[in-house]
Image: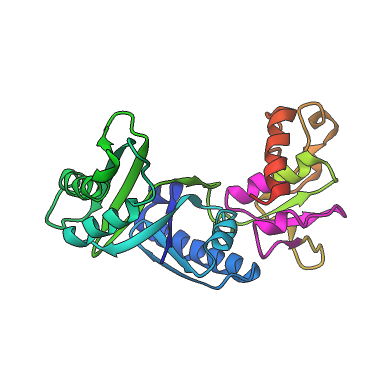
Amino acid sequence: MAILLLRYAEIGLKSAPVRRRFESILKDNLLNRLMEDGVEALVTSKGARFYVEASDIDAAISSVRRVFGIASLSVAEESTSRMEDMCQMAAEYSKGRIGSGQSFAVKARREGSPGYTSLDMGREIGSAIFLANEDKGVRVDLTNPDVTFFVEARDNRAFIFQDYIRCHAGLPVGTQGKVIAELDGSDRSIVSAWLMMKRGCRVLIKGDADYSMLSQYDTYLRPYDPQKDDPKKMLGYVSGADLDGIKDIDVTQFPIPVFFPTVGMTDDEVDSIMDTIKLGL
């Protein structure tokens, strides 16, 4: 059964206590996103990896790649980290994935001290793949292979996969406090709110514009309520103004800092992010 192997990036730079807190929030965000999308899944974590087991892998991919904090994911097959088991898994996994006469390479890495090196893994697993596909005339090419197999051994588990699916990275929403984002219906205002979410901020929406697209990235997204949301407790106010529009904004009227996330971006850059948001990718 396939399993999703999820990686983070920036979180790994934090101190151990902060990293544990961010990982906890990230796991909650993953579970909430999957539940909101109606995807039944089991989410676990260990080391610098999260693992998602789901009966509908495609639906799980669609959900978790919209969770900020995840840098990349891979659809992997799992075995134990015993060399014999990894070789058997890789041999079976490679069948049907290498065409006649194609070249291949194995890129291996291991975490901890399992009794073998990454070079040992690459050599033994590569040999197993070669023997399993010898009748096709396959060959090894470590420089420019037609097919690449990635293998990771972590503790008593091992994973083999072929692709890295890039995600949005950033920080988990909810790790950096709250901001008020004004949506005026323009693409820049929506992209500005999205960029603040990517930096880990919980966004409160101000304005009557439709923000349903942004809900795909935060299950707790809600409107700003002046009756119960004290602006002085917010990290800042988010505007979608561009370089020309800043001159019309009097920042002294705000009791909190004002952020302009898209001020240095071209229209094409804003449009590119907006296309991503519209497609829910």
Q: Is 153 rendered above or below residue 134?
A: below
In this rendering, does residue 256 appear at all? no
Q: Can you tell which quarter of the image residue 185 is in?
A: top right
| Along the viewing direction, whichever of 221 and 128 lies nearer the viewer | 128
Query: How is the rendered protein coloured?
Result: rainbow
Q: Is residue 194 magenta?
A: yes
With 252 as the anchor, is 201 left or right in this view?
Answer: left
Q: Is residue 12 left or right of residue 112?
A: right
Q: Residue at x 77, y 68 (%)?
A: 228
- For the N terminus, the quadrant is bottom left
Residue 118, horizontal then vertical, whole percent:
20, 46
Residue found farthest to the left: 115
Which range of residues does the magenta coloring cover?
A: 193-222
Question: How far across and down, in percent of the image, does residue 55 sit?
Answer: 51, 70
Q: Which residue is found at the position 38% from the left and 50% from the top? A: 96
Q: Is 228 rendered above or below residue 166?
A: below
Specify whether residue 122 is in view: yes
Q: Nearer the viewer, residue 187 or 143?
A: 143
The residue closer to the viewer here, 126 or 190, is 126
User: Is 264 covered by the magenta stretch?
Assistant: no
Q: Is residue 147 above or below residue 74?
A: above
